[in-house]
Amino acid sequence: MAPNGQSYQLSINTTGQHGPALTAAGSQRVLFLGDSFTMADQVPTNQTFVHQVERLLSARYGRAVAGINGGINGYGTFQ
């Protein structure tokens, strides 16, 4: 359930990251490593900071940029 009380579907791709399946064709990739804040399983994918950075970089450079969400739920800064 999202913080505003609405339900959403958490999508985990085949490689275990929060977000859509990775594609190889025509995009630059940026890997985000981090803890549960990076994974952001409490919000829809299009509201995560990984998706927002992906969108901003794509707009700035005029080509597809794929953000790979490598966050791990339950991890903190120590890990």
Image: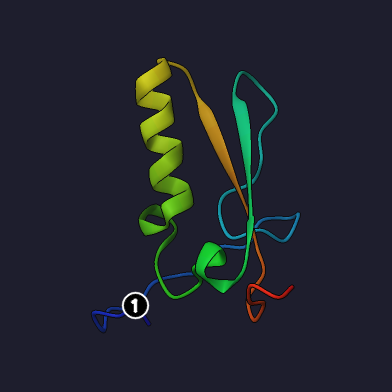
The crowd level at tag 1 (other Cα within 10 Å; few <14, some 14-19, many 20+) is few
- In x, y percent, where is residue 58? 42, 26
Which residue is painted at 34% across and 77% down in the image? 2
- In x, y percent, where is residue 43? 40, 69
Indicate left or right for 78 with 63 as reference. Answer: right
Quarter containing the C terminus = bottom right
25 relative to 45, above or below: above
Circle 1: element type: loop
Colour scheme of the rendered structure: rainbow
8 relative to 21, above or below: below
Q: Residue furthest front?
A: 78
**Number of labelled discs?**
1
Quarter containing the N terminus = bottom left
- In x, y percent, where is residue 68? 62, 46
Which residue is painted at 47% across and 17% down in the image? 63
From the image, tell me which residue sits under label 1. 2
Which residue is painted at 70% across and 75% down in the image? 78
- In x, y percent, where is residue 37? 51, 69
Q: Amino acid at mark 1?
A: Ala
